Every structure is written in structure tokens, then in C-alpha cells.
């Protein structure tokens, strides 16, 4: 039997994601990939995977799935959520698992993930990753293109995701301490490339204003509600290339931040661009979050990017091995026929 996870409930929008497919925007193919690469890397390293292994990205509400392999190691990182492991489909309650740690699950167990709180995304990594063929070098789900991930779409009830490993490796579980996955109220941006389409007063209004993430947001773009901005020369430009984090201002004057699944070109003026170091935090913002913007120089943006890389490189140093409880050690020794029994002196 092929080792797999069988989806019972898919959550609101759960997709297979990695760091995306780079080098194809000239052909109209979006980069895509995870919204929060920091939490993504944390989940993979906790599971014992290379940092770019494909994972499940759950948005706002997590999935539930059955384990259809001898055993598997899972890890969870991202926003707050209740994760339970149930012994079978008939169980009403199960063991609650902390986030930012790994856990070993057995055949027949059910993993149930509830609403995602204080953020937007949760990442679920499985040791070894999914046995899914990459498309253009990536397993990221391109929903608009209908490619990558699992059949080019979010997961559905009954999907069976094949795993690369039939059993988990023999090692202690681990947790990750001290990694900040918060989202700042103020996002750093570099002005342009079309800031000249706005007067100095409108640019000042943009930086002085507070915006709310609206319900119209998705993986393609984050729609904001707040002070409307007026264009100096109208709101249509010759379409040009778009980078992740670009802030377009369409005809209604409400800024729109382009996220991972953004189109490759666009024809609205871009007043500013969120710096790459703040893109992971941007991907954590839920609907209703309040944000504002601060201008930085290219040199400051480059320094912030270096600091982000230092954070990513330091994740392994924050991982702590967890010693198994005595009962688990005794059970393992019994399985191997190395002891005949255990006596609890304290009892």
C-alpha cells in the first residue's frame, strides 16, 4: 500500500506549496509558493526535511486527514491553531499537540486542525515530503494555471496525498524555541516605481494613513481599505512587470498589495513596494488586520534582507531535542524484547 495522507476535510484553502517556480515570469508563469517562507522553513526543519521541501499551507482553517502509512513524522509552524491527534475516526477528542514541534503519528490516527488564529497561515510538514512530481521545478500549487501541487488545485475531501516515506526515522522529537512569527503593524516599503503618478500630498497621505486588510484578499493580492489615494495622471499605465510586494493603486484609490500568486504584469500605478524582508510578515496578516507603511532606502532594505537571511540560517540553532517520556522508552524496549516488564516504584 502506498504511504499517504487521506484528506477528510480540506479546510478553507489548503494547498501544497514550496518556495515557488522561479525563472518563468517572462512566459507568464507566476512564481507562487508559500506566503510565509520563515514559518515554512521552520516546519520543514522540525520535520527533518531540507528547507525547500513541499508542505501543506492552510489558510484560516486547517484540514483533517487520516494517516495511511505505518507511521509518519509531522511538524506544525505558523499562526495559532488547535491541532489534535485522534485514535480513529470515531474518537471525539484526541491529544492536543503544540505548534512549533514535531510529532510522530501512527496508521489509522486522525490529525484534526481547527481555526487558525492571530494570523492567516499554518504550515504542515511531513518527514520526507510528498511524492508529487514537480512542474517547472516546483510542487507549488498554481491555482489559476491549474498546475503543480495536487492536481493544480486546493485539496478536496477524499484526496489521497502520497508520501515519500513509509515510516518515520528513529529519532527524538524536537521543538523550536524563540522564533518570532509576529506581524509588525508598520511595513517597510521602497517608493516606486510609479510614485511620480502621485503628488507629494498623496504620498504623505499614504504614509500617514492606516489601512485594514479587507475580506476581498487572497493569495494573489491583499486588498486594503483606508484613505483613498488620488492619481496625478489617471490610473492606467502601460502594463509592466510586477514584483511580489508591489502596491498597486487602481481607480478606486484603495491600495492593493500583490502577493505570491500575483500576475506577472499589470497596468495600475505602483506607489511603493514592500521590501523582501517584510514579505513573510505580510503573508501572516489576517483579514481585519490594521497596517501602515514606512519608507526606507534601498540600502536599508538590503540590510533588512541580510538580517532575514541570518534569521533563516539561525533556525536550526533554535531547535531543541525532546527526550521521550519514560513510558515511551519502556514501550519501545518491550517492542524490541529487551525487557520483560516495568515496575513503577512511585506508584
Image: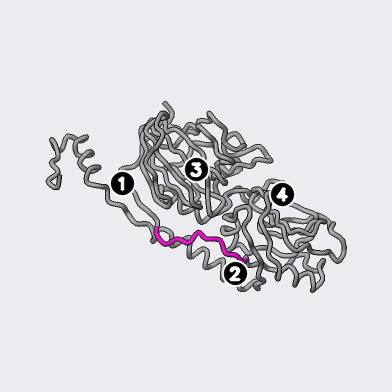
Distance from Cα at disc 3 to Cα at disc 1: 28 Å
Q: Residue at x 70, y 71 (%)?
A: 208
Distance from Cα at disc 3 to Cα at disc 2: 38 Å
Left or right of residue 294, residue 150 in this image: left
In contact (CB < 8 Å): disc 4 and disc 2: no
Distance from Cα at disc 2 to Cα at disc 1: 39 Å
Q: What stretch is highlighted in magenta?
A: 177-186
Q: Which of marks 3 and 1 is in front?
A: 3
In the picture, the quarter occupied by the C terminus is top left
Find residue 133 and report its image quarter: top right
Question: Can you identify the residue that label 1 sits on?
Answer: 171
Question: Can you identify the residue that label 3 sits on?
Answer: 114
Question: Can you identify the residue that label 4 sits on?
Answer: 263
Q: Which of marks 3 and 2 is in front?
A: 3
Badge 3 density bin: few <14, some 14–19, many ≥20, Cα 10 Å:
some
Distance from Cα at disc 4 to Cα at disc 1: 43 Å
In the picture, the quarter occupied by the N terminus is top left
* Circle 3 SS class: strand
- Upstream in sequence: badge 4 or badge 2: 4
In contact (CB < 8 Å): disc 3 and disc 2: no
Secondary structure predominantly adopted by residues drawn in magenta: loop
Question: Can you identify the residue that label 2 sits on?
Answer: 302
Residue 339 x, y percent position in the rendering: 14, 38
Residue 56 x, y percent position in the rendering: 52, 43
Q: Nearer the viewer, mark 4 or mark 3?
A: 3
Residue 346 x, y percent position in the rendering: 14, 47
Observer-nearest of 215 and 245: 215
Q: How many marks?
A: 4
Left or right of residue 174, residue 51 in this image: right
196 relative to 318, above or below: below
Distance from Cα at disc 4 to Cα at disc 3: 31 Å
Amino acid at each position: 500500500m502506498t504511504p499517504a495522507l487521506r484528506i477528510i476535510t480540506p479546510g478553507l484553502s489548503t494547498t501544497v506549496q514550496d518556495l515557488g517556480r522561479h525563472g518563468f515570469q517572462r512566459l507568464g508563469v507566476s512564481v507562487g509558493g508559500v506566503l510565509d517562507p520563515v514559518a515554512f522553513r521552520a516546519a520543514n526543519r522540525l520535520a527533518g526535511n531540507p528547507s525547500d521541501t513541499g508542505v501543506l499551507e492552510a489558510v484560516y482553517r486547517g484540514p483533517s486527514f487520516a494517516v495511511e502509512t505505518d507511521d509518519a513524522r509531522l511538524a506544525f509552524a505558523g499562526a495559532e491553531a488547535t491541532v489534535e491527534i485522534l485514535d480513529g475516526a470515531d474518537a471525539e477528542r484526541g491529544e492536543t499537540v503544540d505548534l512549533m514541534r514535531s510529532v510522530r503519528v501512527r496508521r489509522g490516527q486522525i490529525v484534526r486542525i481547527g481555526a487558525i488564529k492571530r494570523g492567516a497561515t499554518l504550515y504542515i510538514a511531513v518527514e520526507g515530503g510528498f511524492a508529487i512530481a514537480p512542474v517547472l521545478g516546483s510542487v507549488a500549487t498554481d491555482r489559476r494555471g491549474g498546475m503543480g501541487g495536487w492536481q493544480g488545485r486546493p485539496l478536496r475531501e477524499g484526496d489521497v496525498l502520497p508520501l515519500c516515506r513509509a515510516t518515520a526515522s528513529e529519532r527524538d522529537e524536537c521543538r523550536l524555541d524563540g522564533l518570532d512569527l509576529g506581524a509588525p503593524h508598520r511595513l517597510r516599503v521602497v517608493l516606486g516605481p510609479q510614485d511620480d503618478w502621485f503628488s507629494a500630498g498623496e504620498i504623505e497621505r499614504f504614509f500617514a494613513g492606516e489601512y485594514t486588510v479587507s475580506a476581498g484578499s487572497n493569495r494573489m493580492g491583499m486588498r486594503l481599505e483606508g484613505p483613498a489615494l488620488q492619481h496625478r495622471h489617471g490610473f492606467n499605465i502601460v502594463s509592466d512587470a510586477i514584483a511580489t510586494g508591489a502596491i498597486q493603486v487602481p481607480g478606486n484609490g484603495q491600495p492593493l498589495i500583490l502577493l505570491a500568486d500575483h500576475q506577472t504584469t499589470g497596468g495600475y500605478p505602483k506607489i511603493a513596494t514592500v521590501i523582501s524582508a517584510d514579505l513573510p510578515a505580510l503573508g501572516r496578516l489576517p483579514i481585519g488586520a490594521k497596517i501602515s507603511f514606512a519608507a526606507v532606502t534601498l540600502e536599508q532594505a538590503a540590510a533588512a534582507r541580510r538580517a532575514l537571511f541570518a534569521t533563516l540560517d539561525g533556525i536550526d540553532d533554535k531547535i531543541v531535542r525532546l527526550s521521550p517520556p519514560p513510558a515511551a522508552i519502556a514501550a519501545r524496549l518491550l517492542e524490541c524484547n529487551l525487557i520483560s516488564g516495568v515496575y513503577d516504584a512511585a506508584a
